[in-house]
Image: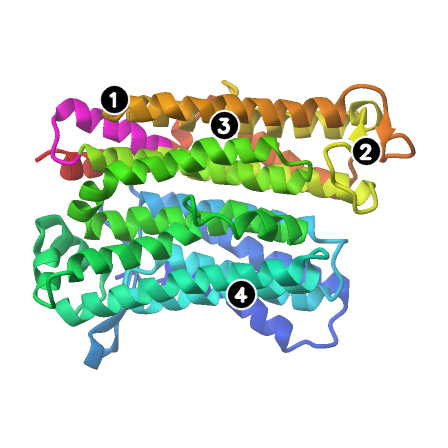
Amino acid sequence: MNALPLLSLIIFVPWAGAVLLACLPRLGAPASRALALGFSLSTLALTLAALGSFDPATTGYQFVERHDWIRALHVHYHLGLDGLSLLLVLLTGLLSPLCLLASWRTVAEARFFGLLFLLLQGAALGVFLALDFFHWFIFWELSLIPAYFLIRLWGGPGAARAGYQFVIYTIGGSAFLLLGFAAIFAATGSLDFVELSSLGATGALGGKLASLGGIWPQAVFLGVFLGFAVKVPLFPFHTWLPATYAEAPTGVSMFLTGVMSKMGVYGFIRVLWPLFPGPLHAAAGPLLWFALGGVVLGAFAAMRQTDLKRMIAYSSVNHLSYCLLALFAVSVATGSSRPASEAAAAALSGTLLQVFNHGISAAALFYCAGVLESRAGGRRGLNDFGGVRSAAPVFAGLCGIALFASLGLPGLNGFVGEFLIFRGVWGLAPWAAAVACLGLFATAWFLLTFWQRVFHGPRAGAAAGPFADLSGLDFAVLVPLVALMFLLGVLPHLLTGLFNPLITSWANHLVLP
């Protein structure tokens, strides 16, 4: 226990800001924006405070808060921080203020927008820190409500349909997740992730579920799997994503791809893998093909897009599928030898780096698409521009860095994570790594096509007339993201040092017999 409930503060200070905005209905737009930004920055400040006392060598949870909540159901208010959750809380703290800045001048009803955004930010942080399913699921579901209204009220012409599709898919996945944990509670009497992970590691969880009936272990695994597969999303559950990301306002698109999509990957790592190592190992072969579908078909789908935001959305499907490819490859190797353990450690390290670095680069690309859209009066087609580099050279340079970071250029942040994923997958399932190379080639094709058509050649389309370069506000959003791309490309140990001991522990326990 800690005297200062630091993790609770990380979650609830943004919500306190939302409550304050709700209580000030006459607050003007500039003050509303400033207040929302200040409360959003609290996450970064509190996370840096936690980082100063965080011990990476400790593989267990730190800053633990655990209190009885509903004794009749054995429910506890349980929070904890390890290298995985620290990485995602830090990502949320970095991106959230930038997402608000991205919406600084473009959204009406600034007070209501800031209120909803702070609710969304706090809910995402709760998902990354809660260790009891009861309140973890509350945070998980509460994130949908503000996200839906942010899309529906401030999105593009197709926002209504995209918002409904987003909610229907994710609530449908959550229903399977809830049913699965209801069965787990009936079998074990516990909803605590730490206790359930211990049962999963020994195989006792499967035995307790089998006592409910012959098919229950497989059915519960499938239900929990579907809940997370929709959220990432895993191919073929991805069809809600392109429209949602394309129709959402720029700042919300940045948060959806940078933070909310990571909630699904986090669920795979934190919940599904520790609780169901045996069923996941049994299903890993077919699941590798689904991950490869996202890697390869996601990239080829991006090649066919002319809408820049839809192109970046399909690119997100492609990049996050690399994370699932690594996880399923590690699951294939469960119970293998020391070389497999080393490959698994590489794959898992690459996965965590990819989660963080994709959040940075994809958020930057969505902001760049938003800049193009705002300068072009709402147009954002691949063929609506030409020669932007001549009209706005600074913008072209920063957007080019973000494109090449997403491409995985050595020296930028995207390279190290992808390299480690391929290094690990090659040692565990070489054929899968070979097939995934098709995704790399297609990614290079569509990102370079974006770069060539929009920024090079004679000025054409929306860039033929007046086309302003970046403003001070644009610099405030893009420069921190680009700086992180360089910093983490050259010094990746700034992140890997936070989770290397944890990754080694996972690889040894989940791969070795």
Residue 337 falls within the magenta-colored stretch: yes
Element class at badge 2 = loop
State which region is magenta: 334-350
Residue 428 falls within the magenta-colored stretch: no
Q: Which residue is mark 2?
A: 469
Q: Amino acid at mark 4?
A: Leu
Element class at badge 1 = helix
Give the spatial CA distance, label 2 vs label 1. 46 Å
Q: Would you call the spot at circle 3 few (<14 residues within 10 Å), some (14-19), or many (20 or more)? A: many
Q: Residue at x 76, y 43 (%)?
A: 373
Q: Residue at x 59, y 61 (%)?
A: 163
Give the spatial CA distance, label 4 vs label 1. 42 Å
The reply to whether discs 3 and 2 touch (Cβ–Cβ < 8 Å) is: no
Task: Decide which of tag 3 and tag 1 comes sooner along the chain.
Answer: 3
Q: Which residue is mark 4?
A: 119
Give the spatial CA distance, label 4 vs label 2. 33 Å
Q: Would you call the spot at circle 4 few (<14 residues within 10 Å), some (14-19), or many (20 or more)? A: many
Residue 486: percent from left, percent from top: 55, 25
Q: Is residue 59 above or below residue 428?
A: below
Quarter location, residue 289: top left
Query: Is residue 16 in view?
Result: yes
Secondary structure mostly seen in magenta is helix
Quarter location, residue 183: bottom left
Q: Which residue is mark 3?
A: 413
